[in-house]
Amino acid sequence: MKLLHHHKTHKSLVQTEMYENKMARFNSANDQRLSAHFRTALERCRSSYKTRKNNMAMPVSEDDLKAEHRLGY
């Protein structure tokens, strides 16, 4: 009877360890994917900003700048 209880205890411990290992690997891979995704999005935003900045004709009136800022360009 003691052996059965001992087996159940170790079985649950092994299952817990396996779950924690799988979750740790998932979290690590997910963090890497998120970092890559946001890095790519940031680079696209920077590129778009630089392009729009270079295409902006200077001098621009203050009203035009405010209007473009409100529109999100």
Image (cartoon, grey):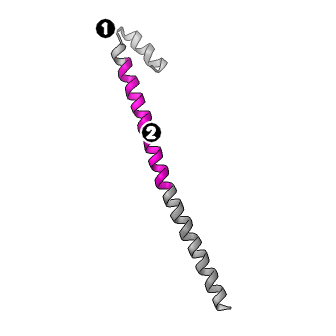
Does the stretch in magenta take in 45? yes
Which of pointers 2 and 1 indicates the residue nearer the eye?
2
Q: How many marks?
A: 2
Q: Which residues are magenta?
A: 27-52
Q: Which mark is residue 38?
A: 2
Q: Which of the 4 image quarters holds residue 18?
A: bottom right
Mark 1 lies on a secondary structure that is loop
Mark 2 lies on a secondary structure that is helix
Closer-to-camera residue (1/68): 1
- Quadrant placement of the C terminus: top left
Q: Position of residue 69 (x, y in %)?
A: 43, 18
**Disc 2 to disc 1, C-alpha distance:** 34 Å
Does the stretch in magenta take in 39? yes
Residue marked by disc 1: 59
Amino acid beneath label 1: Pro
Amino acid beneath label 2: Phe
Callout 2: 10 Å neighbours few (<14), some, many (20+)?
few
Magenta stretch, main secondary structure, is helix
Q: Which of the 4 image quarters holds residue 3?
A: bottom right
